[in-house]
Image (cartoon, rainbow, N blue to C red):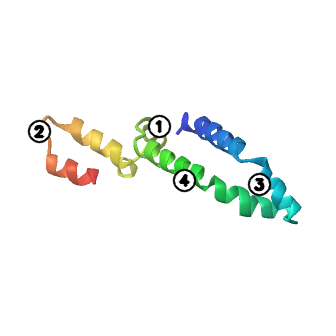
Amino acid sequence: AFAGDAFFVFMLVQFLRSIPRDMEEAARVDGATSLQTLLYIVVPMLTPALISVALFQFMWTMNDFLGPLIYLSSVDKFPVSLALKLSIDASEAFEWNKILAMSV
């Protein structure tokens, strides 16, 4: 999550720059306020980028190993990815049924 935040800001800024100014100007000519332009023009066009950011953040957070080791002191609160890694490293005899059940 540490390196992802700057990526998401860059991604959203680039997406906002790609929105044509003509749409905003047309909304102003039609009598829309700045808030209405934001809510009815910009945000619906921004939805795919926001969904992409949410999916990337979810995937990177679920696969994060270092963050939970720093923040969490209880093994019970570790995410699934860390619990799977700890269960694999715990012994040489893998319990594949438990590992596969946890990965679903």
Looking at the image, do the residues carrying marks 3 and 2 touch, with CB atoms under 8 Å apart?
no
Image quarter (top left, top right, bottom left or bottom right) of the C terminus? bottom left
Q: CA distance from mark 2 to mark 1?
A: 28 Å
Task: Of the two numbered discs 1 and 4 on the same chain, state the one appearing first in sequence.
Answer: 4
What amino acid is labelled 1 in the image? Answer: Ile
Pair 1/4: label in front: 4
Categorize mark 3 by other alpha carbons within 10 Å: few (<14), some (14-19), many (20+): few
Instruction: Give the foreground label among 3 and 1.
Output: 3
Q: Which mark is residue 70?
A: 1
Q: Residue furthest left?
A: 93
> In what element is the residue under mark 3?
helix
Q: Marks 2 and 1: which is nearer the front?
A: 2
Q: Nearer the viewer, residue 60 or 71?
A: 60
- The answer to which of marks 3 and 1 sits earlier in the sequence is 3
Q: Which residue is mark 2?
A: 93
Q: Indicate the amino acid at tag 2.
A: Ala
> Residue 79: percent from the left, percent from the top?
38, 48
In the displayed structure, does residue 44 sit left or right of residue 54?
right
Mark in front: 3 vs 4: 3
Q: Give the residue number, with chain letter if any, for mark 4.
A: 51
- Which sits in the foreground, 79 or 30? 30
Residue 34 visible in the shown view: no
Residue 81 vs 44, above or below: the answer is above
Q: Earlier in the sequence, mark 3 or mark 4?
A: 3
Residue corresponding to mark 3: 23
Residue positioned 49% across, 42% down in the render: 71
Q: In terms of depth relative to the viewer, which is nearer, 44 or 58?
A: 44
Quadrant in the rendering for residue 3? top right
The crowd level at tag 4 (other Cα within 10 Å; few <14, some 14-19, many 20+) is: few
Horizontally, residue 39 falls left or right of residue 51, namely: right
